[in-house]
Amino acid sequence: MKQRILLITGWGGGEQLLNPLKQSLEQRGYQVELSNIFNVLDEEQLAQFVQHAAQFDVIAGWSLGGELAIVLAHEVFKQTGEAKTLITMASNPCFVATDNWKHAMSADDFIQFRQSFNIDPVATLKRFGLLVTKGVTTAKSDFNKMQSLLHAQPMSLLKQGLDMLEQLNLVNILKNYTGYQLHLFAEHDALVPYQVSYDMQKIAAKFIQVVELKNTAHSFPFVQVELTCQELIHFMESSV
């Protein structure tokens, strides 16, 4: 029986962005459930999602969703002792730079982004979308594809997402996680510095695999669906 996958989207767009990847995995016989982002800083919400995530074999996420997947995998292990397979895509375990994790968005740039969002959320979301697809020759058509998949998100959820991006630092969780973990990075990511993949390779966890995908942008999970699907399946089949 194929593994059951919980697939969590990123900030700003809704879960339909990952629907092409969901369909591709389902065509290979996997059971996939899409999830929008949620507020892991809220204990009640976190408890509900941990209980739900415990029913899956694989917890995966893109961008901020990857950070949420890390939190869920960690909490499920703490509560049940079961180490789920963990997969992140274009996800920085510490999105805003700290003294111990340099390759991330600077605190000043993040503050500026948050202020811009508070003043003009529509324009800021468009600029964010351009960054998601920036870095490859197909950026314009990729942006148009992204726009066709987007669903408007509640302002409260978007603000909670920014709180999580600012506060979450999950590096130590990855260092100590005993389950299988795959982290996919894009060579030309405009939001997650490519150097993060080198930092991740230094994490001495037991079953960690880090892959940098050539000629890709932050958008690869919904733009290069077949490539992403192949990477996920190769890892899941090899870690059974």
Image (tube, rainbow, N blue to C red):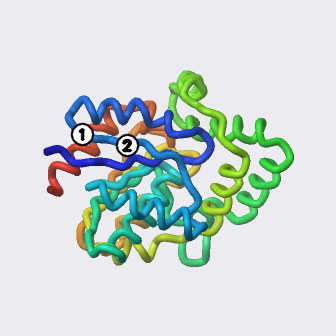
Between residues 1 and 200, which one lies in front from this camera angle? 1
Under tag 1, what secondary structure?
A: loop
Mark 2 neighbour class, 10 Å CA radius: few under 14, some 14 to 19, many 20 or more? some
Kindly identify the amino acid type of the residue bearing the numbered disc 2. Answer: Glu
Q: Which residue is mark 1?
A: 30
Residue 217 lies, in percent from the top left, at: 49, 39
Q: Quadrant of the N terminus?
A: top left
Kindly identify the amino acid type of the residue bearing the numbered disc 1. Answer: Tyr
Under tag 2, what secondary structure?
A: strand
Q: Look at 66% across and 51% down and name the residue there.
A: 157
Q: Look at 37% across and 58% down and name the residue there.
A: 53
Whether residue 29 is visible here, answered yes or no, is yes
Whether residue 195 is visible here, answered yes or no, is no
Mark 1 neighbour class, 10 Å CA radius: few under 14, some 14 to 19, many 20 or more? some
Residue 33, which numbered label? Answer: 2
Between residues 188 and 224, which one lies in front from this camera angle? 224
Residue 46, which numbered label? Answer: none
Q: Quadrant of the C terminus?
A: bottom left
Residue 145 lies, in percent from the top left, at: 54, 24
Query: Whole-Å distance between the Cαs marked 2 and 1?
Result: 10 Å
Q: Look at 51% across and 27% down and name the residue there.
A: 137
